[in-house]
Image (tube, rainbow, N blue to C red):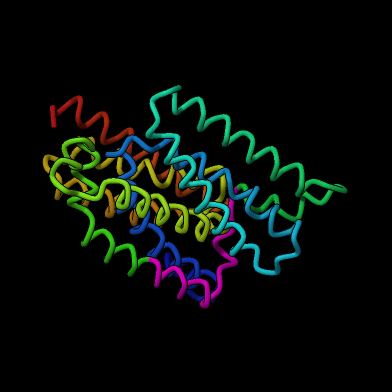
Amino acid sequence: MQLFELLQYDFMKNALLAVLIITPLFGILGTLIVNHRMAFFSDALGHSAFTGMAIGVLFGIGNTSLSMILFAVAFALLLNYIRHKNVVSSDTVISVFSSLSVAVGLAILSRNGNFSKYSALLVGDILSITRKEIISLLVILVITLVFWYAAYNGLHSIGINSSLAKSKGIPVTLLDNAFVVLVAVIVMLSVRWVGILIINALLILPAAAARNIASDNREYHLFSVMISVFSGVLGLVLSYYLNVAAGPMLVLVASIIFFVTFLARKLFHI
């Protein structure tokens, strides 16, 4: 059995192309999410996909991806506003909103026992992605790279000290909101293929693993993208030969890499 026999099938070619687009996206965004301590934020955002889809179903919107994106953008801006308030614990409030959005979404989608139609969202199905959807992901990748190039220094300064960044004339609120909107759009476009339960892991694990072994900021971003792409490709290949879902396998590979880099840092004092 040849290693690359999977490429004989169009659905595997499409899945591989999607992985090669999605994983660099996650690698790039993950570094900023980790730096901004937004792991819990991005997890809540992923879970809001249920409510976005439910709103689309409730109002008869044919393109539920549109309703998911619109809801996610509004949800992200609300969570970002809450995150910067110090009146109560932001983690607690974000958890409440996250739980509420999931409950509302599940309640609507499960009416009359119809939830089975939407259960694929939980683990995703990257094998069903089409060329048209791959093109939309490619457009988002280009937009993300442009945004990252133009706004990275400002976002990095905000992640270190937002007050100091503001004193230097950096538009903190504008950049921060633009970043969470971009994350919201990417998560909603990717959640169908990656899965609600595991999309946050794919955002966080490559960046966390890269942080274990990187000696400077350039290596941090480079290693994050490399680990993300490697996890995606190897996870997809293993899922094909082991006959398991691709999304969970991607997370398993990324998790193993994280623990290996964690041990390497401890043993070799990286």
Q: Which part of the image, by quadrant, shows the C terminus?
A: top left
Magenta stretch: helix, strand or loop mostly: helix
Of residues 249 and 114, which is closer to you in this image?
A: 114
Of residues 193 and 14, which is closer to you in this image?
A: 193
Work out whether 218 lies above or below 255: below
110 vs 35, left or right, is right
Name the residue at 51% across, 77% down: 131
- Give coordinates of residue 130: x percent, y percent: 55, 73
Furthest-top residue in this view = 88
Name the residue at 27% across, 49% down: 224
Of residues 21 and 267, which is closer to you in this image?
A: 21
Queried whether the magenta region covers residue 136, the answer comes back as yes
Quadrant housing residue 225: bottom left
Work out whether 32 lies above or below 16: above
Work out whether 249 lies above or below 189: above
117 vs 78, left or right, is right
Queried whether the magenta region covers residue 128, the answer comes back as yes
- Give coordinates of residue 35: x percent, y percent: 27, 39
Name the residue at 25% across, 42% down: 210
- Give coordinates of residue 102: x percent, y percent: 64, 40
227 vs 16, left or right, is left
Magenta region, residue range = 123-140
- Give coordinates of residue 229: x percent, y percent: 34, 57
Name the residue at 38% across, 38% down: 38
Q: Is residue 242 visible?
A: no
Q: Is residue 62 visible?
A: yes
